[in-house]
Amino acid sequence: MARLRLYQIDAFTSERFAGNPAAVVPLEAWLDDATMQAVAAENNVSETAFFVAAGDGFELRWFTPELEVNLCGHATLASAFVLFRELDPARTEVRFESRSGQLSVRQTGDRLVMDFPKWKLRPVADVPAALVQGLGCEPREVLMTETADNYVAVYERESEVRAITPRFERLSALHPAGVAITAPGDGSDCASRYFAPSWGVPEDPATGSIHCGLAPYWGERLGKREVFARQVSQRGAELYCEILENRVLVGGQAVKYLEGWIEV
């Protein structure tokens, strides 16, 4: 039996009980995949992150309660927070190797800023019926990320995004794709929500990864290089994005909620 440190961090918020909770488990060596998946299911938050030291950086993996994922923003932010604030306070920058390549995070004032891939959004000509049925409201347009694993439904107003009551059983039929809904923001550049029920995450409170596509999309529409985004989930979240030539910087704050031990 192994005894492991576990942290739970609220990401993309400056207030406890807001943003997106992520569990973070630092490891000396990788556990087997089944054990990590079981830990993620037991934690029952949208993502559990595991990292192992590798050279001058770390290898990083993310699990929902159901599956391992290719990219997760809030759990990357939470992992960097644990390293900077708990394990190595002298550190202000870290590099992670992941399924999505190298990701770096640096501390800038009270924010942590992640260097993430930049995704193009492409129009969807044949919109699946399950998407419209699952959202219950016809979007202005439907796009797909170039990674082909996220639909983006665009609406005219933030109020429409807030009013959506998703039918998760219909959205699950879109697997492996998740669904982001977005519109111009009231008091922000863009507002969004994100659903991934087939991955064990009915509604994600804050989704850093989808802003790899949302930030460039809204930056182009608004003529801005810096985009302030709000995820208008029940918990709420704030993301500060900067669009570079081939990358997107996604920044935010985080706070610690829990620190303890687990036995596996």
Image (spheres, rainbow, N blue to C red):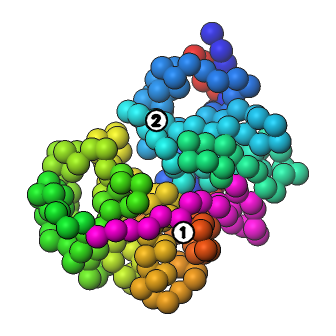
Q: Residue at x 77, y 43 (%)?
A: 57
Does 263 appear above or below 13? above
Residue farthest right in this picture: 90
Part of the protein shown in magenta: 104-123
- Is 67 situated above or below 249? above
Q: Which mark is residue 239?
A: 1
Q: Are marks 1 and 2 in contact (CB under 8 Å)?
A: no
Determine which quarter of the picture holds residue 29: top right
Numbered badge on residue 68: 2
Looking at this rendering, what residue extends furthest in the bottom direction? 223
Instruction: Indicate the secondary structure of the residue bearing disc 1.
Output: strand
| Spot occupied by residue 76 in the image (x, y as percentages of width and height) | 60, 49
Q: What is the CA distance from the residue labelled 1 to the residue labelled 2?
A: 24 Å
Question: Is residue 82 found inside the magenta-colored segment of the image?
Answer: no
Left or right for 172, reference 74 = left
Name the residue type under label 2.
Glu
Q: Quadrant of the N terminus?
A: top right
Residue 108 point in image, percent of width and height: 75, 68
Mark 1 is surrounded, within 10 Å at the Cα level, by few (under 14), some (14 to 19) or many (20 or more) other residues, namely: many
First in residue order: circle 1 vs circle 2: 2
* Residue 174, image x, y percentages: 23, 48
Residue 67's image quarter? top left
For badge 1, the amino acid type reads: Leu
Q: Residue at x 28, y 82 (%)?
A: 157
Q: Main secondary structure of the magenta part?
A: strand
Q: Is residue 8 visible?
A: no
Lateral position of residue 260 relative to residue 18, left or right: right
